[in-house]
């Protein structure tokens, strides 16, 4: 795991560059790349930068690392955030194919989203994660059954520590299979979570963001001074 500190603008540029470079490198070995993206307040800046990147989007399949069990155009939907930030424009400019964008339909079982992911290898090549104020990533929450799940794929998350209560999430096992992870800690509201993350005495069950330590190539980008 590599920890990088800088202002938010610089960290957003760095994240975009890391993702673009890894996608291009992976495409030398395979026909497509699977990118997992989150919701949250830390990612829109990176999503906007995707629009000006040189990422070959027609060879990228985008899945959500988690979402709320709401309609895709609901204000609580992580997919809606991604769509409004960059996916809609990529589609309009024909830089990405509609079939490369994989939204979660809350009216269908989580097994169907897992089945969709399995069509493209059953795991993420690259995963972008944003830590919550309590140190959660995706919808894996501290000391919650979600982080303890042994499922290899997506899971149902009920009674989550943060509303809305019903969600789906990539499991611990699914996230840690990724080839590259980028974890964000942006803003003073995330300072306590960041301090817990760098505390060697705390475990993954206490700070789910620590799961990135199990990923072969991982970067933690932050603008928080510890």
Image (spheres, grey):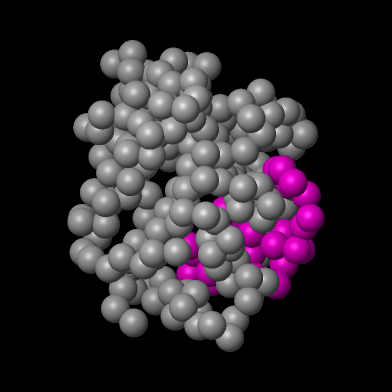
Task: Give the quadrant of residue 106.
Answer: top right
Residue at the spot x=43%, y=74% of the render? 194
Residue at the spot x=38%, y=34% of the render? 25
Is residue 32 placed above or below 36 in the rendered structure?
A: above
Camera sees residue 8: yes
Is 152 in the magenta?
yes
Q: Is residue 218 left or right of residue 102?
A: left
Task: Give the quadrant of residue 113.
Answer: top right
Q: Observer-nearest residue: 80 or 86?
A: 86
Is residue 43 placed above or below 120 in the rendered structure?
A: below
Is residue 52 placed above or below 165 in the rendered structure?
A: above
Q: Which quadrant is the N terminus positioned in?
A: bottom left
Camera sees residue 39: no
Task: Give the quadrant of residue 83.
Answer: top left
* Part of the protein shown in magenta: 129-155
Q: Position of residue 139 (x, y in %)?
A: 61, 55
Instruction: Name the chief secondary structure element in magenta.
Output: loop
Q: Position of residue 81 (x, y in %)?
A: 43, 40
Residue at the spot x=36%, y=67% of the render? 3
Q: Which quadrant is the C terminus positioned in?
A: bottom left
Q: Position of residue 24 (x, y in %)?
A: 36, 31
Q: Is residue 45 left or right of residue 217?
A: left
């Amino acid at each position: 795991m590599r920890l990088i500190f800088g202002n938010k603008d610089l960290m957003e540029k760095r994240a975009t560059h890391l993702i673009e470079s890894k996608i291009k490198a992976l495409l030398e070995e395979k026909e497509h790349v699977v990118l997992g993206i989150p919701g949250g307040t830390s990612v829109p800046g990176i999503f906007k930068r995707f629009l000006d990147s040189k990422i070959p989007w027609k060879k990228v399949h985008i899945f959500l690392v988690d979402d709320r069990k709401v309609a895709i155009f609901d204000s609580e939907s992580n997919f809606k955030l991604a769509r409004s930030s960059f996916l809609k424009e990529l589609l309009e400019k024909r830089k990405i194919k509609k079939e490369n964008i994989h939204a979660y339909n809350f009216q269908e079982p989580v097994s169907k989203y897992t089945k969709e992911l399995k069509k493209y290898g059953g795991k993420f090549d690259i995963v972008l994660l944003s830590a919550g104020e309590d140190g959660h990533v995706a919808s894996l929450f501290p000391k919650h059954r979600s982080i303890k799940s042994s499922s290899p794929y997506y899971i149902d998350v009920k009674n989550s520590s943060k509303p809305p209560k019903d969600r789906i999430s990539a499991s611990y096992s699914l996230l840690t299979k990724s080839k590259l992870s980028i974890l964000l800690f942006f803003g003073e509201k995330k300072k306590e979570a960041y301090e817990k993350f760098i505390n060697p005495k705390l475990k993954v069950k206490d700070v789910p963001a620590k799961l990135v330590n199990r990923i072969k190539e991982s970067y933690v980008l932050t603008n928080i001074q510890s």
